[in-house]
Image: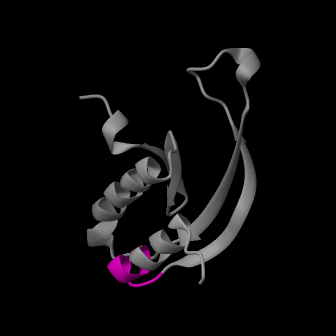
Amino acid sequence: MAVVWVFDIWVIETTERFGGISVLGTGLLGLWYDEELKPEENPVEDHNNWYKIGVEPGRIGELRAYIQKAASTFGQKCIYFERAGEADFLQQLDSLPE
């Protein structure tokens, strides 16, 4: 029996929801600075996957919310979100200030 990983399920669900996804890389090493940590605890090492999802302009908000939910699913403090050369760090939906 094949093992299905949560990332595989997410890729399939994303494809069904938005019509397609490209996996550009997996297991990539990144570093980032967390301002909430002490300086000596930075930088934070982060292993990540890189995806490209094409959506219609009217669905950008839906995609942003979906990615924020993915941050919670994958236990990430935030997820790097890039659109048309502009980047944001999307926090988990449950960690946003009210």
- Was residue 50 drawn as part of the magenta stretch in this picture? no
* Residue 85 rendering spot, x and y as whole percentages: 55, 59
The residue drawn where x is 37% and y is 82% is 16
The residue drawn where x is 69% and y is 66% is 26
Residue 25: quarter of image: bottom right
- Foreground of the two, 3 or 29: 3
The residue drawn where x is 39% and y is 51% is 68
* Residue 80 rendering spot, x and y as whole percentages: 54, 50
Magenta span covers which residues? 14-20
Farthest residue, direction left: 98
Q: Quadrant of the N terminus?
A: bottom right
The count of marks equals 0
The residue drawn where x is 55% and y is 74% is 4
Residue 57: quarter of image: bottom left
Query: Does the magenta stretch mainly form a helix, a strand or a loop?
Result: helix
Q: Quadrant of the C terminus?
A: top left
> Could you tell whether 94 is left or right of 89 in the image?
left
- Was residue 15 drawn as part of the magenta stretch in this picture? yes
* Residue 7 rendering spot, x and y as whole percentages: 54, 67
- Foreground of the two, 76 or 98: 76
In this rendering, is residue 3 above or below 75? below
